[in-house]
Amino acid sequence: MVETSQDDQVPKAVVNRMSLYLRELQQLLRSGRNTTSSTQLGQLLGFTDAQVRKDLAHFGQFGYPGIGYHCEELTSAIRRILGTDQDWPVAIVGVGNLGRALLGYQGFGHQGFSVVAAFDADSTKVGGRIEGIAVYSIDDLEKIVRRERIRLGMITVPAGAAQQVAERLARSGVEGIVNFAPVTLVEPAGICVVGVDLAIELEQLSFAVVSRNKKP
Amino acid sequence: MVETSQDDQVPKAVVNRMSLYLRELQQLLRSGRNTTSSTQLGQLLGFTDAQVRKDLAHFGQFGYPGIGYHCEELTSAIRRILGTDQDWPVAIVGVGNLGRALLGYQGFGHQGFSVVAAFDADSTKVGGRIEGIAVYSIDDLEKIVRRERIRLGMITVPAGAAQQVAERLARSGVEGIVNFAPVTLVEPAGICVVGVDLAIELEQLSFAVVSRNKKP
DNA sequence: TAGATTGTTAATCGATTAACAATC
DNA sequence: TAGATTGTTAATCGATTAACAATC
């Protein structure tokens, strides 16, 4: 029982790179490649070959010494690892600019995520459909989440409302939340939260620029 | 000249936490606090007090032993460090769903970023204004970027077009790029690139959920 | 067989935490 | 003064890289 090591906490950084490997593999498949190697994968992403192999080793053995990796096979393996072989019904709470964009965003469907409901407090938005997805009143959040068996939530409400929404999602049985509101959420018990703050991404960039300009 | 240490590469993780400190400080200011401490800041974000102090130490001394930090003072210091005391004219390339959302997103303005132009290849979109911002033809990218002294670009075009857009932005003098297209960009010489992939964020979440369900 | 490439162990490197003298 | 909290050094911990036997 000390065999496979996926029980001892995999570092967040490793999981992030797994997603990147998956993306490159899908690209390679599209371009007709059958096999690849840790060297090639590393090169495409700017990592060492050792790192690619070490990362994969967290989850098992997927390669063939002397050959490399079968793209197709490794792709399915990583999808299974990340859980994207399953279907993930997603709800979006907050139909402002960002929420609306996410509703129309194609990229999710490919990876097993399907947005099946949206919520808003503004009664003028409620009842309609955006990009084919029904917009419900936030008052019905618990009911609809349960009925549609929604597993993930994306929070695109104003900062002040985010914590409360997170708690309501958690209480309704949602298992994970991507929070786009620019606040740190107190994680409701037994739920996973990932934060995405667009302003912070831009700040990382401005720092990189000014610090390069300073002493290159 | 070995005095302040901001010349030796600051780890990306540290810079990211600086943004988080800034966000919390702004929150504290809004709630009327004058001073804070490494312990409080750490608690709000789930870090140790030692980490907060160590992170800040990369850039200088900002605190008062026995007192803590003046919120206002530390806020300005971090803004200066991140470069968000300056004004950053931003362009958005690709006015699809995501691009449109970013055009309307409020959160940027607060932090020194102002979207001043948008570009698209679709001639039916060109010439109009969205959220008050002019949409130009992608053919005029170089011209407008120079004219408006645009420093940062956000790429929200389809994956296949992203690399080419990045190169054109770089050639026009843009200093940094946030890439929302789900591809790894080859960084044009002398430019900073930050990647944001919404599908990857969701994958991090699904992994967290499935791995929690597996062996908690 | 020779060449390529894996998985894994050991060595290196870097980041986080603990501890504490200095300071208010 | 006593209590609080900094900045910084040393100790710990974890992640990355290098190296190599095993394998195809």
Image (spheres, coloured by chain):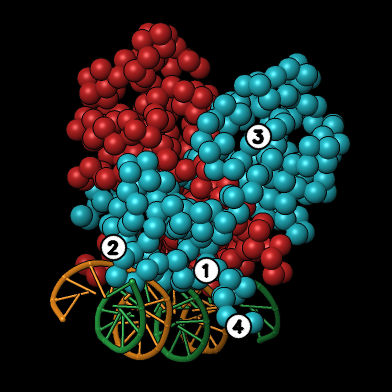
Chain colours: A cyan, B red, C orange, D green
Residue at numbered disc 1? A59
Q: CA distance from mark 4 to mark 3?
A: 38 Å
Q: What's the chain of the residue with tag 4?
A: A
Sequence-earlier tag: 4 or 1:
4
Same subunit, tags 2 and 1: yes
**CB contact under 8 Å: marks 4 and 2:** no
Establish if B145 lies above or below B195.
above
Residue A168 or residue B60, whichever sits in front: A168
Sequence-earlier tag: 4 or 3:
4
Q: CA distance from mark 3 to mark 1?
A: 29 Å
Res. B52 visible in picture: yes
Q: Return the x and y of residue B7 as percentages of the image width and height.
A: 27, 62
Same subunit, tags 3 and 1: yes
Q: Which residue is at 46% across, 26% downward?
A: B99
Q: What's the chain of the residue with tag 1?
A: A
Sequence-earlier tag: 3 or 1:
1
Q: What's the chain of the residue with tag 3?
A: A
Q: Nearer the viewer, mark 3 or mark 1?
A: 1
Q: Return the x and y of residue A46 as percentages of the image width and height.
A: 30, 57
Write down the quadrant of residue B208 in the picture: bottom right
* Quadrant holding the N terminus of chain A: bottom right
The kind of secondary structure element at disc 3 is strand
Establish if D21 lies above or below B77.
below
Q: CA distance from mark 4 to mark 2?
A: 29 Å
Residue at numbered disc 4? A2
The kind of secondary structure element at disc 4 is loop
